Image (cartoon, rainbow, N blue to C red):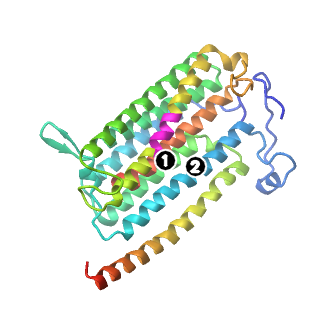
Amino acid sequence: MAEGTQQHPLKIYFFVWTLLFVFSAFSYLVDWFQFQGYLRWGLILLFMLLKAGFICAIFMHMWWERLAIKFAILVPCFAILVFVFIMWHESFYTLIVRKLFFLVTGS
Amino acid sequence: MEESASTVEVTIPPNKGLVTEWASDQKAFKGVPWGKAMMWIFLVSDTFVFSIFLISYMTVRFSTKAEWPNPSEVFALHVGHVSVPLLLIAIMTFILITSSGTMALAVKYGYEKNRKMCAILMLATAVFGASFVGMQAFEWTKLIMEGVRPWENPFGAPQFGSISFMVTGFHGTHVTIGVIFLFIMARKAWRGDFDTGRRGFFTSQKSHYEAVEIMGLYWHFVDLVWVFIFAFFYLW
């Protein structure tokens, strides 16, 4: 948006600011209480996505942008998920090959 | 390219829908200043850079036979006789969020052409950012003293060191560059460059309050990356 056309009340910034503090505190507490397994990973991901979403939407003003630029920014990021998927499988393949190799060589 | 003087009001054309705008002549991003569009495109490319670091971290962590060091213990700090897990990292996280808040307010006051508040808040952001880098230097010193190297460490999987230094190092570099630019922008704002449209010494372009928002986008991105590093590297 152009200069002088975006006027947001202070309230929304302080609200999001507080939320970010709360989410950060929660994600720290996940480690503090030593949650393990899916509960830990789920909570970490949840707080991470909430924080990232609020920073992008409100602090970076993406909420008020036009669809044309929103899509140009967000759509390419889905390629990352594809790469994560590929490398996730690749890493398990590497692990199996390593284990086999060490099994055969006996080290 | 036409120069945008600070007195010119940019009129925003009505929203005609995504496909029409992408397919339109000359400008796809209607009403978006070119500097801001370019910053967003840079940030998308930087997102890919950091994604590749985190994906390589995932790959080495999943494919190593050795046990991955527990970051909760590695990054613990001793307060008196008590070992507090991830203390420094938690403080760094809160500092970066605080700086993101001050930057968001600086952008808001920039829109309102409130020169002094904008400059003071950007200066505060820069100071928080600098303290973040200082703490990271402390963390690195501690890791190096404990024998963590890019090729080995006393805690477990040797890949831990290389990933730790590379990811936090690249993020720290981004913060440092941000701090330098925040100081420059705070000075510009304080001097009134954005009101008078004084030409920049390097680009010779007229100064403009848009620069504050572009600076803000970069700074929030640095915070955004830390959110992902905090989750995947320190907490996972």
Residue sticking out furthest to the right: B25
Q: Chain of mark 2?
A: B
Write down the residue under mark 1. Answer: B225
Quadrant where the N terminus of chain A sits is top right
Q: Residues within 10 Å of mark 2 (few under 14, many from 20)?
A: some
Considering the numbered disc 1 on the image, is that residue within a helix, a strand or a loop? helix
Quadrant of image for the C terminus of chain A: bottom left
B55 left or right, relative to B145:
right
The residue under label 2 is B46
Which chain is disc 1 placed on?
A: B
Give the magenta range: B170-177
Q: Is residue B230 above or below residue B98?
A: below
Percent from the top left, x then y, of residue B162? 38, 54
Which quarter of the figure has residue B145? top left
User: Where in the figure is residue B32, as x and y percent of width and height?
Assistant: 74, 39
Say if B179 sits above or below B201 in the image. Answer: below
Residue B173 counted in the magenta span: yes
Are circles 1 and 2 on residues that touch, CB within 8 Å?
yes
Quadrant position of residue B151 = bottom left
Q: Position of residue B117 (x, y in %)?
A: 55, 19
Same chain assignment for discs 1 and 2: yes
Three-letter residue code for mark 1: Val
Which three-letter amino acid code belongs to the residue tagged 2?
Asp
Main SS, magenta region, reads helix
Secondary structure state at the residue bearing disc 2: helix
Give the residue drawn at x 65%, y 20%.
Answer: B113
